[in-house]
Amino acid sequence: MNEASWNMTMTKNGDLKRDIVEKLKYSVGKNPEHAREHDWFAAAALAARDRIVDHWITTTQNVYEHKQKRVYYLSLEFLIGRLLTDALANLGILDECRAALSELGVDFDKVVELEPDAALGNGGLGRLAACFMESMATVGVAGFGYGIRYQHGLFRQLIQEGWQVERPEDWLSFGNPWEFERPEVAYVIGFGGRVETKSNTVEHQIWTPAQQVMALAYDTPIVGWQGRNVNTLRLWSARSPNVLRLEEFNRGDYLGAVAEQALSEAISRVLYPNDTTLAGQELRLKQEYFFTSASLQDLMRRHRLQYGDFRSLPDKVAIQLNDTHPALAVTELMRLLVDHEQFPWKDAWEITRRTISYTNHTLLPEALESWSVPLIERLLPRHMQIIYQINGDILEELRALPDTSDPFLSAVSLIDEQSGRRVRMGNLAFLGAHKVNGVSALHTELMKRTVFKDLHHYYPDRITNKTNGITPRRWLYQCNRPLSGLITAAIGEGWVDDLEKLEALAPLAEDASFRDRFAEAKRQNKIRLATIIGERLGIRTDPEAMFDIQIKRIHEYKRQLLNILEAIALYDEIRAQPTANWHPRVKVFAGKAAASYHQAKTIIKLINDVADVINQDPAVRGKLKIVFLPNYNVSLAERIIPAADLSVQISTAGMEASGTGNMKFALNGALTIGTLDGANVEIKERVGDDNIFIFGMTADEVAERRASGYDARAVIEATPALKDVLRAVEMGVFSHDDPNRYRDLVHGLYDNDHFMVTADFAAYSAAQARALAGFTDRTAWFEKAVLNTANVGWFSSDRTIRDYAREIWQALPIEK
């Protein structure tokens, strides 16, 4: 483009286009003629960021001016994904930016695709935290997120010969235009060393750490809808106080000169280091204390500057622990109040308990963290002392109660004496919080009956429910433009920040014209997903087929194994009845397995092996396709979810805390096939029994069957289709290169089917058959699809945040 034509285009649009070009020149350092697409992404992001900053500063000023109570959300994960489209949409300038770049000769969609996902989380936990941050900004809660700025985040998943292979996710390789480095905000974090008792006027403890690490702050503004409020996500990066040991360097010991730096920076290098080794466990514990301590020091500094007296902390500050990863906040806040601020122990405990609340996300014992006493004593000696003292006080208090039958109170104790002396972080978080919440109605009731049964007995008012939600801005308005445009045309734009207004769509389920347009929006999304599948995997899929989708972390309790076994059974049926009128089906899987989780990685391999056989078999002639999309992340989810016809939510009943993928699918017009687990129960209540496919055992039935001794072998023998499928898998039908590959997997189902795959197989197959039959009646199917979208508005994270603010944090937005 020559200079004359360039100047002409600059007159066609407004300030945004001019600002993008200025950012390209003065911040990126490129002129438009030589800029590449990545340069344009950086320029567009920086131009958007400038607009965010004005709102950000105003929001912060309002919080100070109105002395608004702050909510500090501590989470080891923030799966925020790409931010450009999110920020532009919430600022109301998405279409303007698209037009500006188009006039500059730049493809907006290609620019958006260049932004890396901020892979700062593993799955639902981190995505929930991201939704909550956006909703806090939208509804006006003064939210402040704290986490770790992982250099690599969750691994990038490759599939090589069907196996998962992990590679570093280098999301910062081109920099991060959204963040602001705060070199002036740095805190010292200690590890190891010794604790001494000092006596001046009052006896107190002095901890002298052996190792010190600096926590440096990086701030990312989080924009609420229409830019009304902008909150802060502060992520900590680890640095050594000593960048280089110059003496060693000058002696030629170049590795030794930077060894301390490497050891310190390892803390924020990778999300979830493999903790099957002692070194991995130590690094994981360091990560948890590192970000927790830095966050508490930071919020206390802020509180001191504004209010001076920490006795007002519970009135002006709410600290929410997202799972047990930040549970050390209980001991760290006690340490800071008692050791640094000289508060009496009982006063410090009262302040701590009134300030902290805790969200539980799991009923799995292995996921409810515990750390060995020797490890904590070595890394955090003062905190181990505090844990002992808290434990002693609690046990003494409970022993004095008239209904205490166990003098040892072993189930309540912070120390598990049965497993080599370990600190129960769930118990620590529970006892150090004034409220403990589950994330779905079923999960909360099961918490009371299982993992926290004894604690609930002594503290019956502490557990409460806050069913999870999702932000409609990202998970419908942005990711599904065909459907969101149709909805807005039908009922107006008010639904975007008041999702329950979608109820106005319900009467339109009977409107043939609206159903047809709804179906066309779904078809557009399926074409887009089919294109992605073709480009990435070379597999051709038919957009007219039923897209049957299960995307989530690969785990035995989520039962991807049940899903692929049912697919094999369907494959056998199609081959046995080749002339039957089979409607085409595409079964899509995506998700990552933990690097050390061998069984989950074996299930990924089985899915890919089955796909290789079925997709190449001319006998099925496109009637069934199996797809495993690698490297599942937020951006891929934004492409997959709008295209789903059937949402597969089949966890073993009683094991999924909530799920949020189930909400995203239903919001985008997919029908759920699932167990009565997690939030599926509440989705069923909202959408109605006729608009969901429920199958299998309930949580109580699963518990009863386990207690009575489940005989999987008898069930398999009585289920011919399942027996045939397992025989084929065991005999190597899907693993010709290694016929024994899945023998142990199959034997495990026969001998110890803890996750009840075999028990629910027949019911799942029948439910899948009902779903496929229902899909062939387009009128009935899309009537149900419209009603799913219309009736799940309650699952907005805006509603969830308002519930937290009103009932846990006492931090409702102030009308300004």
Image (cartoon, helix red, strand yellow):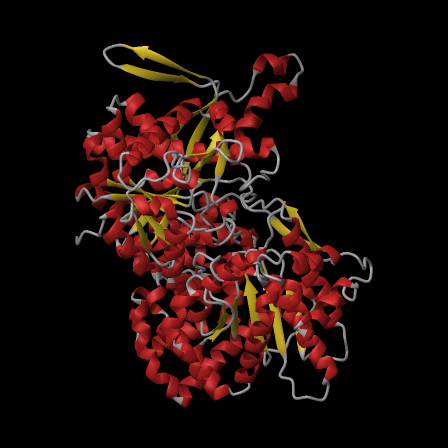
Q: Residue 449: where, in percent of width, then height?
A: 39, 53
Q: Nearer the viewer, residue 662 or 598?
A: 598
Q: Which corner quadrant holds the N terminus?
A: bottom right
Q: Which residue is drawn at 38% across and 64% down?
A: 472
Classify 331 as above or below 339. below
Q: Which of 530 and 372 is in front in this view?
A: 372
Q: Residue at x 39, y 77 (%)?
A: 688
Classify 259 as above or below 650. above
Q: Residue 531: where, in percent of width, then height?
A: 61, 70
Q: Residue 220: where, in percent of width, then height?
A: 40, 45
Q: Nearer the viewer, residue 452 or 780?
A: 452
When asked about the image quadrant of residue 293, the answer is top left
Residue 112 visible from this viewpoint: no
Residue 791 visible from this viewpoint: yes
When asked about the image quadrant of residue 183, the answer is top left
When asked about the image quadrant of residue 258, the answer is top right
